[in-house]
Amino acid sequence: MTQREIILKHFRKHKFITSWDAIMEYGITKVNCVIHHLRKDGYKISTTSKEVTTRLGNKTTIAVYTLQGRPERQTVIQWAAEYDY
């Protein structure tokens, strides 16, 4: 399974993913690149920032990616028909 497919599968289940989720759950350290390619494929994905506290007590910002809609045109990665908006 490709990183794009992994992220799409996660979106189908949860509707959003954080950069931290991608690292911890899937080992995808550059999720921003995966999101960029999904956007180029036509997926509508918004990005927001979320401030979190690290285990050392420091503040840091992570990205939160939310799937807003599926592509209007056909993509290389097939969208599951059972996933509706």
Image (cartoon, rainbow, N blue to C red):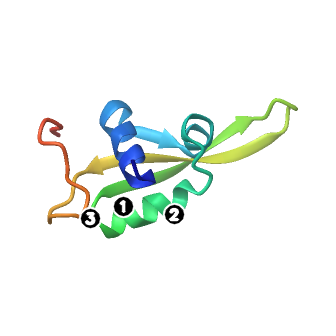
Q: Residue furthest right?
A: 56
Viewed as shown, does residue 50 lie left or right of 2? right
Measured Cα–Cα span from mark 1 to mark 3: 7 Å
**Quadrant including the C terminus:** top left
Circle 2 sits on which residue?
Answer: 33
Measured Cα–Cα span from mark 1 to mark 2: 9 Å
- Residue in view at x 29 percent, y 58 percent: 43
Q: Position of residue 20 (x, y in %)?
A: 62, 41
Residue 48 is labelled as none
- Residue in view at x 15 percent, y 38 percent: 84
Circle 1 sits on which residue?
Answer: 38
Q: Foreground: 16 or 24?
A: 24
Q: Quadrant of residue 75?
A: bottom left
Residue type at tag 3? Gly
Q: Position of residue 38 (x, y in %)?
A: 36, 61
Residue 42 is labelled as 3
